[in-house]
Image: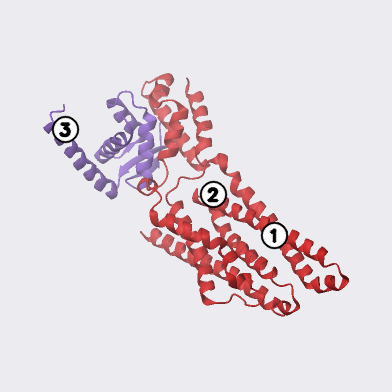
Amino acid sequence: MSGQMKKGILELCILHEVAKKETYGYEILNAIGGVFPGMDRSTVYGVLRRLNADGSTAARTGDGESGGPQRKYYRITEAGQAALRELTDEWNAVRGAAEKLGIS
Amino acid sequence: MGRETYLRQLETALRKECPEPQVKDILSDYEDFFTTGIAEGKSEAELCTEFGPPEQAALELAKESTGDTRLRNKKWSVPVIVLLVIFSVAAIWPFFIPEIQAIGQSVPTGPVNFWLALLFPLALESILILWASQSTPQKKALRWIPHVSIVLTVLITAVLALLIFFTFWISQRSALFEAEGSFDTAHVLMTATYRGTVISEILLLVLIVLLMLSAIRGHEKARWFLFPDTALLTLFLNLTGFLSNVSTASGLNHAATGVASCFLWAVLPNLTAAAVWWAIEKAISIRRAKA
């Protein structure tokens, strides 16, 4: 998958995951990396960092695995909710259009 | 590849692309990813493959992890380019004003000149602030540029001050030289210093451009250094224009007023612009803190 489309879809997926519940970085990377074979988890992490910098998600630092480094927990913000709604609408429009053309 | 090798390679690659706090933050996250992954039963090699090559990860992270992309992805807008052209011309403008060329007779205290001088640094800063909000932080490898530029600017400023002083000294003594019959010597000296001044001023302009570029890449110090820099450049440009015309005794009567007005013309507007922007930025940051 290339460029803009990948970024858009990754944003949608990450926001969707984070909207479900407060969750930590590895879990997000693993959930999304697991369904997109061949995608580097660093790419997912990059998009997550950007969403966090944009204010679509917010992070708090909590305890990690015992003895391990500190772990960041991410939750969705109001701006993130709005972005998620917008991206979901866009996605449905794209999917609807593709279906009408018979792409499956 | 094992965990330690991966983290080391990632660190090296990140240091080339991102500022230090970001490098630390990313590395700490990757350490947690490894710890968690291993606790979930994955091998280090498996995790390395999942993360992808460290060099590529670093490049991708440097691109992604800063600022608002909606702003950052914006290309230079047309108004910004137009402003830049107008005010780049304004920077060398004093050379072309007949009033300043003939400054020995008339002193540039007109309101139009003052407002243009005020607008130039203001516009320069506006452009920088616009760009700064759109750009990623400067690559670490290029961070010597603003520092070297600042040092060089100070040095060239000192040289220019000496040259201007020398020009003034010669012009004051030109009558004396004439009486001694060594007018040619005075003329040669005058031409040489004048050329030296022009070259130094061009260098100063180049350094200002370098500082501008650094400021655009988010270098805070370079941005604030631009105010005294543009102030000094306009001051020297004016003084050069002024002094090249003060070679007669009648011109000398205006010397003190001329130098004073050059100073006012160049330094006051720049300081005003700096103060205005400082106030605007303070106001913005206060509003942000509230929100």
The hue of chain B in the figure is red
Task: Quadrant for the C terminus of chain B, please.
Answer: bottom left
Secondary structure beneath label 1: helix
Provide residue B112's location: percent of width, then percent of height.
Answer: 51, 74
Mark 1 / mark 2, whichever is N-terminal: 1
Question: Which residue is at 67% across, 78% downward?
Answer: B257
Provide residue A56's location: percent of width, then percent of height.
Answer: 32, 46
Secondary structure beneath label 3: helix
Secondary structure beneath label 2: helix
Specify the subunit that label 3 lies on: A
Q: Which chain is purple?
A: A
* Residue pointed to by mark 2: B214
Callout 1 amino acid = Thr
* Residue pointed to by mark 3: A98
Label number found at residue B197: 1
The answer to whether marks 1 and 2 sit on the same chain is yes
